[in-house]
Amino acid sequence: MTQPPSQPGPRLDLRGAVDLSRLSQQAPSSGSGGGGRFVRDVTEADFADVVQLSMTVPVVVDLWATWCGPCRQLSPVLERLAEDYGGRFLLAKVDVDANPQISQAFQVQSIPTVVAILRGQPVPLFQGAVPEPQVRQVLDELLRVAAENGVTGTLDGTEQAGEADDQPAPLPPLHQEAYDAIQRGDLEAAADAYRRALAESPADADARAGLAQVELMARTRDLDPEATRRAAADDPTDVEAGMRCADLDVLGGHVEDAFTRLVDLVRITSGEERETVRRRMLDLFEVVGPDDERVLAARRALANALF
């Protein structure tokens, strides 16, 4: 079982810039009939709403399928715990067969898989039919991490997705324009809005991070994860394949793997190729967050590789 990390995964957006925005263009599909006040079936059509809700309440995502025996063991446990915890998190149930884009976005290898979303960030939790006492331990740790990151809202059982006790402050106009563009899948318009925000205020750290995140989303939108990883494994000196794989690593929350991969590429390249890899690392530093301990460690590793 994988415990939640001491800090959430990459800062993929503070208001929804996870690469699931295009899912809002899909038609709704039937779910597992999840019950309870704090349990809901989620499809590709409304997944962006639960990403938004994660700004104020942790979202626990149960990725399952009708044919999966262990899923039938785990799901009732999660539903019961959602009620026991009294709205401290939302349980979002996703049928992976009916919603393949969600499964792909989380890079699901087997089911059941349980992940969390905090402030739009993916947090891997565990795979398999884990016993209830261990699930409780994971949830307790998740709530601790959530509190450290200001995600302390509580559901009252009547909210629609995107509503909670504590609503986030309104975004600045250009940031809202970017967020709306992300929601409708127009990444070019989102990037343009962030660039205009930076032109107005070059010190706008949120706009700078948002731009890096949108550019990451654009780079990975049409990638085939399996083919991308296979290409990088077949030729570790292939700079483009390595950078694409690093993008997927960050998107999936495997931040250290991404930075290690890129530092290794810096060591074996020179000239313009090395500069290209260095710039990609700087972009991903913005995505993860410049003060993140993993970024600070990667900066030191990058400096050692360069000099």
Image (cartoon, rainbow, N blue to C red):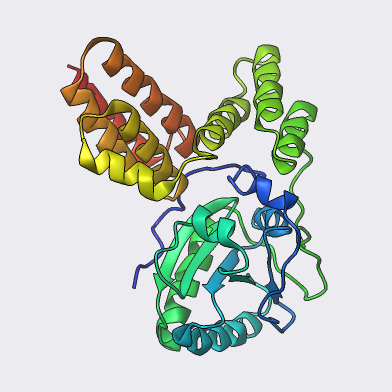
Q: Position of residue 252 (x, y in %)?
A: 44, 50
At x 33% / y 21%, what residue is drawn?
Answer: 278
Residue 74 in view here: yes
How many marks do you count on the picture? 0
- Across and down, in percent, residue 187 comes to 65, 32
Left-right relation of 5 to 189: left
Q: Is residue 54 above or below residue 236?
A: below
Residue 34 lies, in percent from the top left, at: 68, 81
Q: Quadrant of the C terminus?
A: top left
Is 273 or 26 nearer to us in this picture?
26
Q: Quadrant of residue 133?
A: bottom left
Residue 153 on image: x %, y %: 69, 63
Placement of 212 over or under 145, stated as above or below: above
Q: Quadrant of residue 258?
A: top left
Residue 37 falls left or right of residue 265: right
Q: Mark yes or no: residue 89 visible.
A: no
Q: Is residue 218 left or right of residue 129?
A: right
Query: Residue lying farthest top?
Result: 271
Quarter of the image where the N terminus is located:
bottom left
